[in-house]
Amino acid sequence: MKTRWYFWLVVWIAGMYGCGQGGNTVAVEEEEDFPSIEPIRGETVTIPSGSFIMGSDDFAEPESPPHPVALNPFRIDKFEITNRQYAAYLNAIQRVVDADGNELVDIGDRDLQLGFTVNGLEILNPEATDHPVVEVSWYGATAYCEWAGGRLPTEAEWEYAARGTDGRHYPWANDPLDIGLLFDWSTAGPTATVGSHKEDVSFFGVSDMGGNVAEWVSDWYDQHYYKTSPQDNPRGPEMGIRRSARGGATSPRPRDMRVTVRRRYPPGVTGRSVGFRCVYDP
Ligand SMILES: [Ca+2]
Ligand SMILES: [Ca+2]
């Protein structure tokens, strides 16, 4: 146990000082000390191939114009990736930066429910075990999905999984008041156990696409992208500065939970209301 604790301390310090190379070297040397850890797989929802109208004319400019998009089939995690799942990942890879030195997760941030104990990296608050992991960068989200045999959804895949084919404004309905769904975020805390908001279920049966945490997607962000987006399986601009994220989080305003809202953050940013889920090709 002591070796494990010491190992993580070294990895953490290497990560804190941006010493990606050092972290990798340690990981290779110590690899044999630890059993291999497999991804904890959650339920997935199969999204059939199909077409839908992406975007909206009714709200912010980056959401327009509405345009037809056709997608190949995919499977998507029914729930956001949890602290339990991400802890398994970090314990499997034994580092907190990627090979290029990018921070995967903001270890040490008090909003992150994962941290170091004498037993190594653990979930600090047992009640948050199945809350979505937060304080993960786009790099940390991308790397997790690859480890789990998938990838981050594209913006188009995310919106299709949330919106389906009937042009609704919210994952669960066209009007947030249809089912009285206005979470009292002021008392609910920043995150909740995934799937616990029973009303927040999308057209295709995917949970928490309206709220809980916003979710990284794979695309670079360009506010004008919809004007030139290809119709078939759009994957976003070739280059950019910020990555896109989708869905509402802790805001009490229902308009922030609309399926067409587009968010953007630098890929290295880690925040207390941003998590992710993965998709898998059939
Ligand atoms: Ca969400
Ligand atoms: Ca942070």
Image: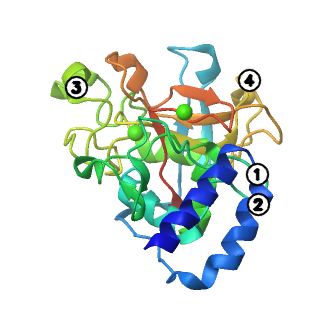
Q: Residues within 10 Å of mark 1 (few under 14, many from 20)?
A: some
Q: Which structural element holds mark 4?
A: loop
* Ligand 1 quarter of the rendering: top left
Numbered label attached to residue 22: 2
Disc on res. 19: 1
Percent position of residue 247, x then y: 45, 33
Q: Which sits earlier in the primary sequence, circle 2 or circle 4?
A: 2
Name the residue tied to disc 3. Answer: 183
Disc 3 secondary structure class? loop
Looking at the figure, which quarter contains the C terminus? bottom right
Examine the rendered structure and indicate whether residue 59 appears above or below residue 163. above
Ligand 2 neighbours mark 1 (CB distance < 8 Å): no
- Say if mark 3 contacts mark 4, CB within 8 Å: no
Image coordinates of residue 31 in percent, x first then y, are 63, 79
Callout 2, which amino acid?
Gly
Quarter of the image with the N terminus is bottom left
**Viewer-nearest residue: 68 or 4:** 4
Local secondary structure at mark 2? helix
Visible in this render: residue 25? yes
Q: How many marks?
A: 4
Going by the numbered disc 3, the residue's amino acid type is Phe
**How many angstroms separate mark 2 from mark 4 (CA)?**
40 Å
Which label sits on residue 140?
A: none
Residue topped by disc 4: 224
